[in-house]
Each structure stands twice: as C-alpha cells, then as structure tokens.
Amino acid sequence: MSSPDSPERLTPSDVSHVLLEFLMYMGKAILLLYPVYLTGSLGLSISWVLLSLLVWNMWEKNRKHKDVRIDTAIDFLENEFNVIKGEMKTLNSPAWIQFADVEKVAWINKILHQAWPFFGVFMDKLLKESIQKSLQESSPHFKTFKFTKVHFGQRAPTITGIRVYTHEVDKREVILDLNIVYTGDMTINADVKSLAVGLKELQLQGMLRVILDPLIGQAPLVGGVTMFFIRRPNLHVNWTGVTNLLDNPAFRNFSETAILDVIASIMVLPNRLCFPLVDQVNMDQMRFPLPRGVVRVHVVEAQDLVAMDTVMMGLVKGKSDPYAVLRVGNKRVQTKTIKETLNPRWNEVYEFVVHEAPGQDLEVELFDQDTDKDDFLGRFNLDLGEVKKEKEIDKWFSLQDIQSGKIHMKLQWLSLQTDKNLLKEATDGCACAMLAIRLDSASALPKDQSEFSQPDKPTKHAKDSKLTRRQTNPSSYVKFSIDQQSQKSKIVYNSRDPVFEECFTFFVHNVESQVLNIQVMVPEKKTSLGVLTLPLSRLLNASDFTLDQRFQLERSGANSHLKMKAILRVLKLEKPKPKVETPPAANLQKGLNDKPQQVQPKPTQQQPQPQPPVQSSQPVQKVPASTLPQEPAATMDGPVLNSSSSVHQTAYVPHSRRGSFLATDGRRSRPTTPSRIRRYDSHSLLSENSIASSRLDLADSTPYPEALLNHQGSFGQIQLTIRYATLRSKLIVTVNGCRNLFQCNDSGSDTYVRIYLLPDQTWKHRMRTQVKRRTVEPVFEEKFEFSVPLEDAKCRMLDVSVKNNRMFTTRERKEIGMVLIDLSKTDIVKGSIEWYELSLPGLKKNEDQPST
C-alpha cells in the first residue's frame, strides 16, 4: 500500500479500462467511416453518399417524431386527470363532469333561469325609482336623465362551477367561489337632454366570492352575506343610440375600462357588498375586515426566455429586454428592465396586502420592452393560499403561453400581530408594519377656503348677494400620504357632510418617525378644505393599536371633523413548520434490530472501510455525538462506525440531506436476500473503491481539487423527478436542476449531471445532461429513460454525480457532488419529485462532526 505522501498513480485496472473504451470508440469510428472509404475505392459518385445520408436523416427524424407522439399519448394516459382538468378549466363543461375541488351545479342554473324574469322586474323598479333619482341629484348635467326602457332579456347568468371552502377557513363561516358567465340579451335605454343612450348586450365573466359569516344558532342560521369579485371580471358592452360611438375600437377600451372602474369601486376587492340578515351583525366588520396577511415577493431572476429582438432583418435571433409585471388585486408593480439578455437578474422585493387567502392570485407577466409595443414573454398565476399554507415558497416557476422560460421567485407569508416586542425597524427596505385606515365620513366642511381663511371679512348685503353666483355645497375627496405612498378616496359631490366608507392600507417602515398626512381636497380647484397630521407612534400607545374617533381638521371650520378608524399591525415573518425527522442513528438502530446479527472481523488501520449509501426519504437534522447509539464494530451486521481521522476513512455528513454515505466493512458478506429477487446492493457495487474503479470518469487515484478539499459546508442539492412508465416498461428520470452547488471559479461552475442505473456502468449506459455554464443553480429539465422491467427497477439504485466540466488534461476529479438513490425506498409507480443532498464519499469536512 502506498503511503499518503507518495505520488498518485493509475492502477492496471484503470489503464485497461481506458484502453478498452478507446478501442471501442475507434471501432465505432471505423465502422461509420468505412462506407465512405468503400464508395471512393469503387469509384462511385459522391451522390450515393449524400443520398444515403439524406435517407438516414429522414429516417432518424421520422423515428424521433414517432417517439414524441408515443410519449405524448402515454403521458396523456398516465396523467389523464390533470390534462383534462387543465384543458377544461376555462370551458363550460357538461354538468356530469366533476372534479374534487370544483363542482357542477346544474340545479342552481335551473333556479336562475326560472327566476330571471322576476329579477328583471325587480331591477326595473330599482333603476327607475332609486338609481335614476340618484343620478339626477348627482350633477346638474343629469337633471333630465330618465330610463325609457329596461328589459333584462331571457338569458340568465350561468354558474359553470362552484367551490366551497370549509376546512381552510374559520369554523364560523362558509366561503363559496362561483364562476359566473353572463351573455345577456338585455336592452336598457335612457334619455339625457333629448339624447338617446343605452346598451343592448352585455357579456360578463368572472369569479364571485360569497361569504356566509357569521354562522349563528338561530334563524336564519347565517348572520350576513358578503359578495365581491376577487379580481376584475372580463366585460364587453354593445352600445346603442349616441353611445354607439363607444363601440368604435378607439373608444371601446376606454368605455369598458371606465365601467370596470365603477364595478371595482363597488364589489372588487377590497370593496364588498354586504347584506346583514340579523341586527346584531357588525356592518363595519363585514365591509372592512382586516386583511388576512401580507405576502413578500422576491423577484430573483429568469432563465431561457424567448428572444424577441432580431438583427439583420430577422435573419439572426437576438435577445430581449425583459421586465416583469406583478399584480395582486388592484395593485400593480413593475420591475426594472434588464437590457439585452435572456437570463435577467432583478433581485427586487415587493409586498402585497392579501385580503383573501385562498382565493387571491399573484399574477406575473413578463414582457420585452420595445419602442412601439412590448412583446409578451409568458405568464403564470399562483394562489396565495399556497403561500399562507407553506409560509415560504422558493422555487422556479415555468412560464405559460410561451415556448420556453422560467422565473425564480421567493414568496414569504407575514402575519399581522399586536405585540410591540415584534416591532423592529427594517434595515433592508422592507416594511415592518401595516397601517389600515377605514375612512367613514367628514362633517361640517366649509364651502371653500375663503370661508375659514378670511373670517373677519364683512359680508355682502342681502340685495347684493342675489346678484352674485349662488354658492353650492363643495365636492371633496380625501388624500392620504405617508412619505412617498399616496392614495385618494372617491369624490363625493355637493355635500358638506360627505360619506366615503372606504378602506386603505399602507406599509410602514419606521413607526416612530413616520407620519400620516391627511388632506380634504376640492377636485376642481385642487385646494384644501382641511388637513390632519397623525404620528404613527400615537397608535402604539392606543388600545389594540387602534384609533376610532372623530379627528378635528386643521385649517378648516371650527366644527369640521373627519371620522375614521386607523389600525396598526406589526408584520411577523412566519417560518415553515419544521418537519419531524428521524435521525440517521435511529434508522440504523432500527435496521440492526430487524436483521440477524453476524460477527464481522474488526477492521485494521491497513484496511480502510468503504462507505455504502443509505438513502433517506426526508432531510435529517444534525444529531450530537452523545445521542448516537454506541454499538461494537465487531458485532454489527451493517455500517460500521469508523473513528479514524484519515481523509479516505470518514464520511462527510451534511446538516440536512436526503442521501448520505456511511462507512461499512470492506469484507462484509452479501445481505441475506431471497435469490429470486435481484438486488444490486452488494459489496462490489456499494463500496467506494469498486464504484470508482469501474468507471471511466471516476478514478480512485485521481485527487480532488484543492479548493474542494478546503470547502466547508454543504455541496448543494439536486432535484430529480423519478417515475416508472408502466405501459412502456421504462424508468424515467428527469433532472430538474440544482441549487447551492460548489463554486469552482469566480463566475460559478460549468456543471452537468451524469447518471448510471447500477450495476450498468459502461459507456453506453452513461446518461448525462448538457453543460450549464457559469452558474451554481443550473436548471436542466432533461429527461432520461432506462429500459428495465418494473420488478427489476424496484431493486436497483441510481448513481448520480454533479460534475464541473474540465479539459481531459487536468488531473483532478470532476465531481462536485454525488448521491446514490435506492429505488426500493421510492414509489416509482406513483412518481416523486425530491431534493437530494449532495456529498462526496470519503471526504471529511469537519473534524468535530460525529461519525454516523
């Protein structure tokens, strides 16, 4: 045995293996080139060679297309439920098609169709007796407004699906989501100053949420009903009369947007329609409940976007100038634009108030910025109820409605608390608290600024006042601002006591220093009718961090007040619930108790102990050495704990991992397994030396790079999708990506993944991905197939290595992480998507770490 100081040398078996692989490669090359040589020696035309290549190319292309069609058909058969659900998500499917989460409600549609004529009678009275009068009083221009015809037609709205939430919500409420589609043949005509206006058709599609809250123990069992659209519905209007001009494409978007703004101000989150059914229900609580929480969105980066910009008249594909647009409810934000790249990195953080979870979606769209019209680069939606459930989601999301592209995002859930000890000023620019304002009304507002700015000015004689223009009551709105954040209420016309009844939310970064500034403004003149300054620190001393009162307006009338309710809540970052893990030692002890013990010879220092893999289905936590069971090495029929400090004798065990390498005796016998079952877990396959000596790309004598030997910490993780296609009798392994890999240089690593299905380790059984350059978080999404029977696949192991791409002249190992996956511990028929911890067998990283 060579000493540790002696130079590393190739063993005879390594040389023989390399020569054998080289001869096989040369034989294949000669076999392929011999027809070309034969054609030239016989004096045949080069056209025969080209014709042969053309026929071969066409056959190969047809074979690939055939494989793709077969794979698509088989994938459809194996995932029929998800495919049909995705395709019929937006369709009006038949009533007999049902899914677990969305139910068809044909009986409700029958009730709506039967009751629709009576609903039309009710709406006729409502429009002519209530809304018509309100419009006449709102403005002098609508004083002659009158409905001349109201007919809601014969077509009733259709509910295409309903989903009921009972487990995800409070026990005293029931939430229903109704997908509504309405294509109405209504006719509504009106007359304004002898001008005929109206509409004759309305199309509306959206999801209406109905909340039955609270549930009570007396009739009618429900205290109140709340209705609202979670997001803006889709709308199309067909106008008549003078308003038919709005059907022009130049005005259509403007008119429909204006109507949607009106609908959004009434019943799109955070606005709600509330109907109390008993007197004891608090209407303020129904109309303006506190939000469910706050979601913090980290927009990290994107990869493999589609190149939209072209050069040389479209002959050469260029790059894109991507940016992302994020929406939650009515709030919309846009990231910065990264010029000329298909793999942008933004690293931007945004925060959104979540009023309903589950229900509200995070909508993300990517665009390529252009001078004329921005090109679409993909989208995806995520239900924020998933973020509330998981507390934190950090993953890559595939973009939809585009050929390729992924975006990396990290989402965190923040709950609303009233504990002052949790309040800390954010140093990273994020919010530490949220301020919710419920604006109720104002009272005794002055008519204009001169009424309180010049109180001593003599009034005009009554006779002279008749000659002047009669002053009307003021129109007003309220403007809230905290530093750069600003929001406005709706405008209330012609009232000295306007009623607003609106809710606003602000993010607070420093409660002690920030101030809420409030102004009551006149919309036409942009002048102020009163101001109010409220330091946010005042809320910290109030009960439940809440102020609900009338506030005296400054620079206004003596009796001018603003009634509102201000609520401060501290944001607490919720952590994911830790999973209860089984320590490796406990698993080891359980396995020892289940196996008959055999006496093994005690290893000596001249015989280093190889380390077989023991695959764990969940990440495990680091266990102190004192808690590990102490078993004599001579009486263990399994992995033997090695206390040697040699680099090639102690396993590296990361803090959290899915696959690990534990030491074992090199002379242990084959496990007692029935002979009819083929198991590839013998010494010849699981020991380090045997695995290393049987591969062309891993020689046991080749050293690791110095930087890798000095690396402290984890070697990263790899995500694999493993499933078995029963109809095709193939094991399918998809390499999704890696994260937190070892960085081989300043720009990252040029990584690829190599896979063997043990015991097949020849060159033709070697599977590898493409090289992803200059990254430590590569995304591969490459699929590999192994033709193997199901019973055989359940007894095999996957040997996976993540490597740094190097030239063959470098005498260093390429591995920067490895994992062995025992397929007998994975349900390959059902399939799994797992993150596996990478490690390097035989490489010790921490002298204080206990051996396991």
Image: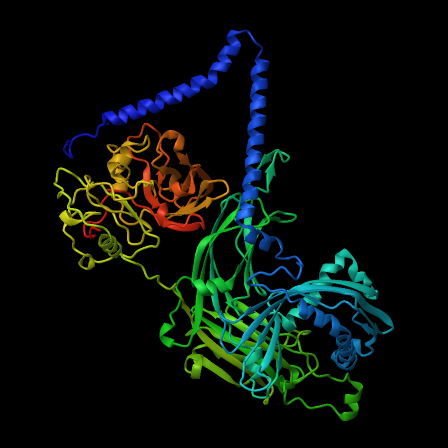
Q: Could you tell me if residue 461 is visible in this image?
A: yes
Identify the image quadrant of the N terminus.
Answer: top left
Where residue 672 appears, as percent x and y from the top left, is: 25, 44
Q: Is residue 642 left or right of residue 71?
A: left
* Residue nearer the viewer, 84 or 461: 84
**Viewed as shown, does residue 727 lie left or right of 699?**
right
Vertical placement of 309 versus 542: above or below? above
Marks counted in the figure total: 0
* Res. 701 image quadrant: top left
* Residue closest to the eye, 339 or 245: 245
Q: Position of residue 843 (x, y in %)?
A: 24, 43
- Give the x, y percent position of residue 451: 65, 85
Relative height, residue 784 to residue 181 (above, below): above
Any part of residue 351 in sight: no
Colour convention of the picture:
rainbow
Q: Specify the quadrant of the image occupied by residue 757.
A: top left
Identify which residue, 432 or 33, lies in the foreground: 33
Residue that appears at 45% across and 65% down: 389
Residue 504 in picture, x, y percent from top left: 55, 73
The one nearer the camera, 232 or 37, is: 37
Residue sticking out furthest to the bottom: 462
* 648 sits left or right of 317 in the view: left
Say if 841 sits above or below 247 in the image: above
